[in-house]
Image (cartoon, helix red, strand yellow):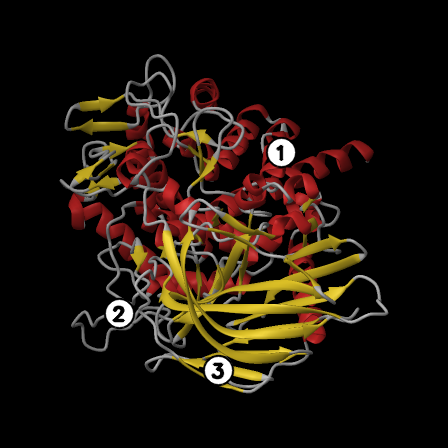
Amino acid sequence: MEPPDIIRFGRATCCDLEQASRREWWLADGLGGYAGGTIAQCLTRRYHGLLIAPAETSLERRLIFVKADATLHDSERSWPLFTNCWGSGAVEPKGLIHIESFQLDGSIPVWRFAIDDLILEQCIWMEQDQHTTCIAWRLAHALERPVYLGIDLLINNRSHHRDNISHEFSPAIEGDERHISVRHAGDAALHFYADGGQLFERYQWIDDFYLAREHERGLGDRDAHLCAAHMRLPLSVNWNGLVATRAAAPQPHLSELLRRRRAHDVSRLMTAAVDAPELRGAPCWVRQLVLAADNFLIIRPAPRQESSGKEDQERPGQQLGQRGELIIAGYPWFGEWGRDTMIALPGLLLATGRHASARNILAAYARFADRGMLPNTLPDEGGQPQYNTVDAALWYFEAWRAYISVSHDVVTLREFYPLLQEMVDWHVRGTRHSIGADPDDGLLRVGEPGLQLTWMDAKVGDCVVTPRHGKPVEINALWFNALTCMMQFSQLIGKKSDVYKTLAGQARKGFQRFLKPEGGLYDVLDGPEGNDASIRPNQILAVTLHYSPLSPSAQALVLAEARRHLLTSYGLRSLAAEHPGYRPHYEGGVRERDTAYHQGTAWSWLLPHYAMAEYRVTGNADLAQSRLAPMRDHLLDAGLGTISEIFDGEPPHEPRGAPSQAWSVAGILEAWVKLERVRRAAKQKEED
């Protein structure tokens, strides 16, 4: 399978600062490190940089290599190829005016500059499983005269969540024309290796970079970076340039590293196509999502859990090594989230043929099961897991079901079955945060003052924006699904399933209380103020989960309400526009954004759920798959080749939040493959 070539822009976009600075490229190295920037090559976020890498034993990521500002020299003439925006409002230099085109070559950002008779190409990529970023340049055709680049290398050493306007960084810089190292206070060194050029030491702070996206978010919008080295790079038709790495050993030539990167992209596409033949011949935008999915799976040292005091008691999965696979919830600022991991796992891993990785993640999370719950977050800094979620554990059952359905790995299921039993038992008798089954109707009740336990988890100070205390609709759809999964798991391994059949039957009967007389479902039952009839998208899960507690006619009513009040091109609104609390735009400072997060903002991870609900109700796979098509256009905006976390609830539905979100990419990919499978089967049946 050839890498997709859907992401491409000409001068109309590349030379326009507004357009070129809103479109971002994102790369990942498979170890928790990443790189990101704009087409214009100006900084607009504190998270932009060419190498952001985690600490040795945690996922706390630090910006260490920021920019490589290149100026093209031809005899007495010179042209900056980079752009900088300053706190004064100035934009200087405006190197973007020389960009003839930008494209993603698979996962690799490629710029083409055209100045007079000079045509120059630049590309950036990260080495897989190394904290290494490569930047290479070449001439598109040979010249009879010498031309070269002068490249300033800007560095830092700060958390990617902060700025560094106070110059809190004083490294030792040393080396020669082929290799320069940057060391600071016991941190792992940053190494620059020249391939085809010469390096020279520098030490100059550059202040007052203006970060437009941080300004929009109501956060600190200035930064400062240290120019640590300068590179002189003669240009030819061969790829030459720079390797920035934490590896203290010379790297192979850039041409070999570039070949390996391209081979990795092709290999990833091929692996996905073996497991999902529907991806062979899939549209370019779908294959681009396969490459985007690769960014979210990383390998890191497995977080250590404090002893529970139970002597010699070992959970399944504890025998795994200290290095483990995990899923990053989104770029650039999200870390590892239990809920997001379980929701994203089928699309990221099962639809792309990575069954062993799915098994490893499911096993790793078993180590953190506590009182029937899974952690919501495993902090970047290596702190204690936070068990402030009710649904992570319930999504865990669905992730296991999805894994077993494609792998048929009954041996592993038998190993983890006792843990799954224990998790159900805790929910039946009650666990932390007043989470437990109501014996009267078999439904799960949830809630504790000051805590946000469902995925609608925004909190402003001590105020929970959408507390949803009581019996939330999606929690109980997940509960019924989990109980039915356990009934099926029991039968698969020859265990008695009567208890789960009884519990599921009770939950199904109790779930009918969610039906509203006018159609659709209550969002929460038995809350502090009674039943909440707000029209929210949570009800769609009662249709799309593998085991639905609703009759076909009730499913159709849920779909109709979602279509009428919540559906947008890019996701489902989190609240109907008719509600007095509706917020049409996600913008402003932290407080303004957090209060709008689940009050009208459209969530892209819910669009594939709507599509699958439409298919379940209508049987029309063509119509359902067409609901996903607007994401093709979105891949050309915001985070290029990937899918944003959220969108404004009102047209034109501006992309907001994290520009690359795991469950957004996973859901679209999973739904497209499932619906394509149905479409191809129907076509084959017609031909037969």
Q: Is residue 302 above or below residue 648?
A: below
Secondary structure under tag 2 reads loop
Residue 305's tag is 2
Using the rendered view, name the quadrant where residue 524 is placed.
top left
Residue 660 - label: none
Which label sits in the foreground, 1 or 2?
Answer: 1
Report the side of 276 relative to 167 (left or right).
right
Mark 3 and mark 2 lie on one chain; the one further toward the N terminus is 3
Res. 629 mark: 1
Q: Secondary structure at mark 1?
A: loop
Q: Is residue 507 visible?
A: yes
Q: Quadrant of residue 573?
A: top left
In the image: residue 68, left or right of residue 331: right
Seen at 32% across and 42% down, the residue is 218
Q: Quadrant of residue 554?
A: top left
Residue type, numbered disc 1: Ala
Instruction: Give, as a three-letter code, the residue at label 3.
Output: Ser
For the residues labelled 3 and 2, the Cα–Cα distance comes to: 36 Å
Residue at the disc numbered 3:
181
Between 417 and 55, the one lying in front of the other is 55
The correct choice, above or below, for 48 with respect to 321 in the image is above
